[in-house]
Image (cartoon, rainbow, N blue to C red):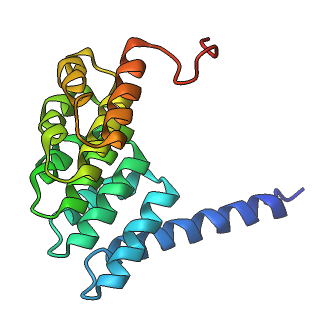
């Protein structure tokens, strides 16, 4: 009797082959001369959550386009791979605020305590959205080393930043954001 591959196995094998092929195309597009292609490739690599996209995305963090660097940082945050922590940290001082904000968000998503010290200075950044992203990231990381800086952020001029700092302090303390819902 001849051993045949089942139709279901063939379909899954073909699907896997196409996914690998598409991933290779997206990785190539990260270095395309067209900014829209690079943006779409970075977004797609973040959505597909394949760890083989991490290293190419890390390389793309040095893209000359601010918008591409911002989207690449977000894609790395979605992948939540600790290999991206050290390469993302320099983006916290990028001249473009969206890149700083995206890097803070990504580091918060990854949740690695190595990012706490580099994120803290963003709590006194000039732009409100960057301060908020920093507070939220520190809350997600949950490291007690951020308490003092977050407590100082409770005095921020902007209510949104104060709220984000308060929520972050609650997370670090292990409290629920909604009273009465503690586990």
Residue farthest to the bottom? 34
Tell me: 82 left or right of 167: left
Residue 77, position in %: x, y? 37, 48
Quadrant of the image occupied by residue 10: bottom right
Numbered disc total: 0
111 and 92: which one is in front?
Answer: 92
Residue 120, position in %: x, y? 16, 33
- State whether residue 111 appears in this view: no
Which corner quadrant holds the C terminus?
top right
Q: Is 142 situated above or below 15?
A: above
Residue farthest to the right? 1
Tell me: 47 left or right of 132: right
39 and 164: which one is in front?
Answer: 164
Residue 14, position in %: x, y? 66, 68
Residue ID at (37%, 35%): 164
Q: Is 95 situated above or below 30?
A: above
Residue ID at (71%, 60%): 12
Residue ID at (31%, 45%): 133
5 and 150: which one is in front?
Answer: 150
Residue farthest to the front? 157
Q: Is 40 situated above or below 70?
A: below
- State whether residue 100 appears in this view: yes
Residue 74, position in %: x, y? 36, 56
65 and 144: which one is in front?
Answer: 144
Q: Is 95 situated above or below 39?
A: above
Which corner quadrant holds the N terminus?
bottom right
Residue ID at (14%, 51%): 126
């Amino acid at each position: 009797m001849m051993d045949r591959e089942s139709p279901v196995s063939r379909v899954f094998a073909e699907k896997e082959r196409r996914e690998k092929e598409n991933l290779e195309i997206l990785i190539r597009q990260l270095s395309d001369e067209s900014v829209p292609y690079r943006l779409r490739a970075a977004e797609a690599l973040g959505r597909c959550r394949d760890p083989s996209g991490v290293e190419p995305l890390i390389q793309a963090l040095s893209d000359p386009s601010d918008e591409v660097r911002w989207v690449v940082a977000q894609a790395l945050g979605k992948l939540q791979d600790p290999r991206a922590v050290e390469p993302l940290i320099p983006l916290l001082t990028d001249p473009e605020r969206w890149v700083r904000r995206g890097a803070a968000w990504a580091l918060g998503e990854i949740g690695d305590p190595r990012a706490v010290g580099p994120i803290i200075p963003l709590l006194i950044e000039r732009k409100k959205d960057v301060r908020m992203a920093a507070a939220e990231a520190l809350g997600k990381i949950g490291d007690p080393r951020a308490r003092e800086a977050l407590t100082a952020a409770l005095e921020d001029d902007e209510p949104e930043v104060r709220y984000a700092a308060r929520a972050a302090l609650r997370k670090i303390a292990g409290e629920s954001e909604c009273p009465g819902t503690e586990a």
